[in-house]
Image (cartoon, coloured by chain):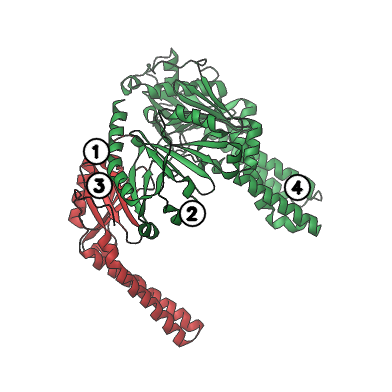
Amino acid sequence: MNGLPSSSPPPSGLPSSGLPPSGPPAEMASWHRLHPLSPLVRTGRHLVGLGIVLLILLFANHSSGGGGNLIGDIVVVAVALVAGVISWLVTRWQVADGVLRIDTGLIRRDSRRFPLSQVQAIDVVQTGLARVLGLAELRLRMAGADSSGGRLACLRLADAERLRAQLLSMAHAPAATVGAVGSPGPPIQAGEPERPLFRVRPERLAGAIILSRTGAYAAAVIIVVALVVGLTGKPGVIAPFLAFAIGVVLSVWRQFNTEFGTVVAAAPDGLRLRSGLVQTTAETIRPGRVQAVRIVEPLIWRAFGWCRLEVDIAGPRQRRENRSEGQRLRALIPVGSRAEAEQMLGELLNVPPRPSRRAPGRARWKAPLSYHFLAWAGDDQYVAAARGRVCRKTTWIPLEKVQSIRWVQGPLQRRLGLASVRLDVAGRRVTGSIQDRDAAEAGDILARLPDQARAARARGLVR
Amino acid sequence: MTVEDPGIRWQRPSHLLLRARRIQTVLVTAPVALVGGLIAGTAGSAPAGLGVGLGLVVVGLLWERFLARRVAAWGYAERNDDLMVKRGVLIRRQSVIPYGRMQFIDVTAGPVERSLGLATLRMHTAAAASDARIPGLDKADAAKLRDQLAALGEAQAAGL
């Protein structure tokens, strides 16, 4: 860990003196500090905000008057910087006994432990400012509900990537070897072979976003604004709606920013996913952590043969920087051709079944718009179900991940002799819905699926 | 017509559940009708207030007619490897929750339920959508079922 200031003496009372000071594992086991520039990166957003406020003040009223506001902002940033420096001074991390430990807090000491065997995924995230400074943030994703603490911000990019590889290799090693200090499994080399699977084409991504719902909203907003300004001749009319308009346009930018340059590659420790234009994210999706796979084909995209492939992974994705991203699933293929999606699907699942069994014809009365998509298929490993009105969504759910199964019949379905079966997986975003089947067939599915899911789980445990 | 499998032995909540639900309906209907009537009475005329109040009472009574069917629709079955829960009149639901998937089990009892010695059992899995509960269990039964389910869950627990 060159470059990491590890010379800081650990405070008394903390177990660190008993570790040998030589060898890479022991080096990891000693206490480390984050990069000295991390307070700057953490307050970076405030600095950007301050810059914008400054510019607005300069342009809007150069007859002064707004100075008090500016001073207030400078004070806020200064306080934030000082707080950041203090927080950097008291934050230390250590890897020992297969546990990542992060100690922080000046007044209220806070010591968090992250057992590496519980780690779902580790991301390397670079915000815009961090990228300029060559820093990166390491985020640990656990299965639990609160992921806010599992972050090391910031480290040098090379260190962050090496640490991630080391942590992941420790996470993979069986508990017995992880338990012993100094044997963090076989360290993964930086130049390990990666098999590239997918790379998004920028022009196609731009086109796809423009043709998606977000793009349509943004286009509508721009047209309305242009029309109003053009007809009335007074730009001031739209001022009250400006915030809304900017928000819509920003959401388009944000989507482009996060999905730009998505690259997926297969590595020994899982699928490597990198993306981002200004803020870059690199994460590794460990095999067997995928709860569901979904292919989405919006109406207009179908004309071009495009689709989107998303995966659902256990654990929350709350990111203050990117809230809209947390609400959607992880897009392995933001936009790609059917063939690319099929190939990725084959990479994620062994032999994915095709949803081939159509819904009975009388389902047309209950679901006139989505009838032509309704279909499902299942084998002893996966259930595939297709649905959607204008936008076809096909969901694959591994049976070993099924949490519970529900049979649902609404009043209209009862009249028509139909029923639906839903499969829930961890998280709240994906439900595999075998929609509008013949009631007898649905009953049969409900009777058979629990046993199949149990068998699949048992196989998964053996494997 | 739910999925009727002769092999499933359905168990029902306590017969006191209907009484609990009736009390709850009265407790909701009476103040709502009173306040609604008062508002309409002060804003409009006295007959209007009386009409609104009586209307709300009638809604409560209609709901009461429906309650018996709703309560009768609840059922649960302990099978070898999973728990089955069925409920609903208009929208019928039948859930299967494998014991190994239960993350934790709650037993809760509101004031009305408590006064009748009832409790509600709630099972949580890692999926937010799978909300399985059994209301109106006898308190002792609920505790026993909870321990039983917890033991079964521990024996069959599986990772995410």
Give the position of the C terminus of chain A as an image quadrant.
top left
Figure chain in red: B
Name the kind of residue labelled 3 in the image.
Leu
Q: Horizontal and vertical percent for residue A235?
A: 78, 55
Q: In whole angstroms, how far apart are the C-alphas of marks 2 and 1?
A: 45 Å
Figure chain in green: A
Mark whose residue sits in front, 1 or 4: 1
Mark whose residue sits in front, 2 or 1: 2
Write down the quadrant of residue A180 in the picture: top left
Q: Secondary structure at mark 1?
A: helix
Mark 1 and mark 4 on one chain: no
Q: Residue furthest top?
A: A22
Q: Secondary structure at mark 2?
A: loop
Q: Earlier in the sequence, mark 4 or mark 2?
A: 4
Q: Which mark is residue B83?
A: 3
Q: In whole angstroms, how far apart are the C-alphas of marks 3 and 4?
A: 65 Å
Q: Secondary structure at mark 3?
A: strand
Name the kind of residue labelled 1 in the image.
Glu
Q: Which residue is mark 2?
A: A368
Is A96 situated left or right of A35 in this image? left
Determine whether label 1 and label 4 are within 8 Å by CB. Answer: no
Q: Which residue is mark 1?
A: B154
**Vertical order, A217 against A19 (above or below):** below
Q: In whole angstroms, how far apart are the C-alphas of marks 1 and 4?
A: 63 Å
- Residue B160 visible in image: no
